[in-house]
Image (cartoon, rainbow, N blue to C red):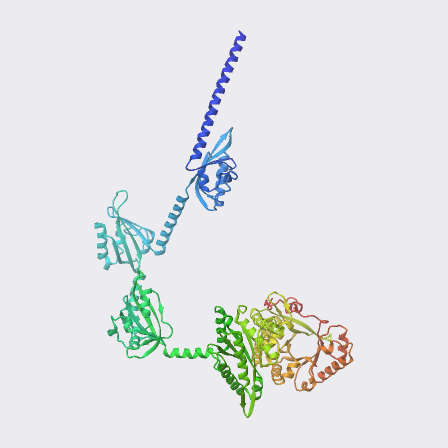
Amino acid sequence: MQGVLVGAVTVAIVLLGALLFQRSRLRLAQVKDSEVRFRLAMKHSAIGMALLSPRGEWQAVNHALCDLMNYDEELLLGSSYQVITHPDDQLKSRSMLEDLLAGEIEGYSLEQRFIASGGESIWVRLSVSSVSAEGAVSYLVAQVENIHAAKLSEQALQESRQRLQMALEVGGVGIWQYSPQNNVLFWDERMYELYGLQPGAPGDGSLDIWRNSVHPDDYTEITTAFQRVIDGGEDLDAEFRVCWPGGEIRHIRVRAETVARADGGDALVLGTNWDVTAEKSMQQSLAHEKERLRVTLTSIADGVVATDEAGRVTFMNPVAESLTGWREEEAEGMPVGDVLKLSEDNVSGPSPNPITVALNGGDVCFLREGSMLQNRDGSRYEIQDSAAPLKSAEGQVTGAVMVFRDVTTRRAMQKKLRYHATRDALTGLTNRREFENTLLESLDEEGPENNILCFIDLDRFKVVNDTAGHVAGDALLRECAQVIGRQVREGDVVARLGGDEFGLLLRHCPAQCATQIAESVIAALGDIRFAWNESLYDIGASVGLVQLDADVSTVEEAMSRADVACYAAKHRGRNQVSVYTSDDSEASRRHLELQMAAGLRESLESNRFLLYAQEIRPIDPRSEQSHYEVLLRLRDRNGDILSPGAFIPAAERYQMMPHIDRWVLTQLLITLSEDLAALPHLNLAINLSATSLDDPTFIPFLESLLNQTPLSPERLTFEITETTVVNQLSSASDLLGRIREQGCKVALDDFGSGFSSFNYLKHFPVDVIKIDGSFVRNLLHSSVDRTIVESINEVAHRLGVQTVAEYVEELALIPVLEEAGVDFVQGYAIGRPQPLSALFEQQQPEGLGLSGKVLAGH
């Protein structure tokens, strides 16, 4: 029995297992069938669908999602949905996903942006749910719906509403709504402001609040008009006045209409109000202004003519009547062209009338310069005018106004001034500025290769100018200008460039022909026999030619090359023609000097000069004063520091030294004056160039600086070379005498290099003599040099003048110089030149800071 029972149980277990297996297989088949249907549904779904891992990685995506994001399926499956989520939406998306994975929510839906493959953002609605197995999230199911267009429309609508609200607020428009059946009136906030009331005022919520505010004189008309809107659906567009509680009167504009309700309810009256008090005031002002304008137009010095849209005269003021010869009553209604008869100077036939042009084009029109107005009596006036269209609020041309004036006298004066502005006052030739403008136009022409620039420099002119005087020199220059002008062709340009230099632009002239013209100029100038005060003078000329080819791009380059060629002609014996060639060594050196001179001007403008200083040490160690000579350096465009030998020769040759001297003095006496004044024991020696001594405006300039600077003049010594004194004894003596009158000292530099130093020293008062370095260098080895130094020192001391030995490059020289009685020494053995800023730092008293001014170039 027990065996039967065991067998029965066994059979039952087997049958139960079979049944469970069959059901499991059926369930598995159903799951597979469901998965197949899901994948088919996902594949063919019109919206984007995807399966994701719990970490957000794409496991399966449909075509709709790929098309939406413009990604290939393989590219998507290699990344996660966080990668393509817009950065501004990642935080919210990540938070929702964390809540889903934690089991706090079963799914979520949100609007966010995905980044498409092209980089653009696309708005989508993302719906995510989870599929769990054995209590853990197995994968995620996501639906992605494209809502980009709807989102943009929503944003546009919101922006439109905001703009409307802003427009209403900015425009001060109040909105109201009235229900005739219920006598209910609704006002927005702006309406209460327009009427000067507060919510809750008597009659608020009904028409009474409005009726109580309407001005009594406007009450009947406006309430009647409003009733017509209620009764017959007629629109309302009117103005009326309201009385504020304080008695102020305001003008209100109202627009209203009856609007049927969409739900079929009773119709409503909707309207807007806005304050037009300012506009009404303006209209009244305009009425007054119109009358004042008419009075003004009749009294101004300009002629005024107005027309209608067809160009017929509607108004003329008295000046217009006088200039045209027509009275307003006669001209009214006539075509403006019959009244304003215009032409151009030296041009036959009528000119286009600017009023006609303004009417047709709708823009302001101006007459050309030289336009003439013919009076009814035949007389002509040169006029200046402008015509402008009159337009309606819609922009339609309704007429035009022309304002003109008689400029006959003024234009004649302008022509005269223009002529003198472009002409050399002495010779009547083109002046340098106009010549350079003409040269620039020539360089801008297409193919200027056949244009030749000539630079003419007179020879021996200085002899005439110095011996016979400036009047004779001027007369000679006028005669030379006439002679040169007779040698050139029509269309060529002759100019006086300055001094005894002339320029000649030969247009479309072959090189051989240009050389022949230049030679004829030299020959003609050489034939001049200039007689003055029973004396006869002859002159000559040197000419430099440069072809204006593609290598010459600027006026400066052209003038530089012509000057170089002229210099070469002078160097080869004068009375010659020299053609510029780039391989001429002398020309190249001259060219480099010219370029350096041009660069010096730019350096001054750019503040690239630097101030250095070198110590001048007293031999007597008991002296508490410190002396420094101010030296100059130049930082070029590459940042390199150039010594004076690299730029001073060019600066002296091309008259740049006076400008440089003024820059140095302005820096020391004005810009850095406070810093220098803070160092009372520091004395400065400043070099002056020979060209500054010849400048009559230099002394007033220096005296002005000395009057402005806080520096004591006793601390300043001005150095001038012995060579300058020899060559310009008179001007140098006068200049340095006035400098000493100011309290400054004068030093004679390079003393001993001249042939008669001692002879003129007694006639030339100085405070310091700087013994030329040629006597100091070999002092240890030359008894002759030692004797000369001792002699110079003894003579100087007998005259009460201190001495400085230059170029002291060995310390062994100092005892010898001390024995000779020299007062100061200067040279590399004492100290090398250093930036002035470094000197300030060394000399600065403890606790005293610089004023903050920056040294030029630093």
- Farthest residue toward the bottom? 534
| Apparent side of residue 688 relative to residue 511 in the rendered image (left or right) | right
| Residue 289 placement: quadrant | bottom left
| Residue 418 placement: quadrant | bottom left
Place of residue 443 in the rendered image (x, y in percent of width and height, measured from the top left): 50, 70
**In this view of the protein, can residue 109 be seen by the observer?**
no
Q: Please tell me which residue lies in front, 541 or 202.
A: 541
| Apparent side of residue 480 relative to residue 726 in the rendered image (left or right) | left
- Farthest residue toward the top? 1
In this rendering, is residue 167 above or below 385?
above
Place of residue 856 in the rendered image (x, y in percent of width and height, measured from the top left): 59, 69
Q: Please tell me which residue lies in front, 368 or 676.
A: 368
Q: Please tell me which residue lies in front, 428 or 640.
A: 428
User: How many marks overall?
Assistant: 0
- The quadrant of the picture occupied by the C terminus is bottom right
**In this view of the protein, can residue 578 be seen by the observer?**
yes
| Apparent side of residue 732 relative to residue 315 in the rendered image (left or right) | right
Q: Please tell me which residue lies in front, 132 or 853.
A: 132
Place of residue 499 in the rendered image (x, y in percent of width and height, measured from the top left): 54, 81
Place of residue 197 in the rendered image (x, y in percent of width and height, measured from the top left): 31, 54
In this rendering, is residue 448 above or below 99?
below
In this rendering, is residue 207 above or below 799?
above
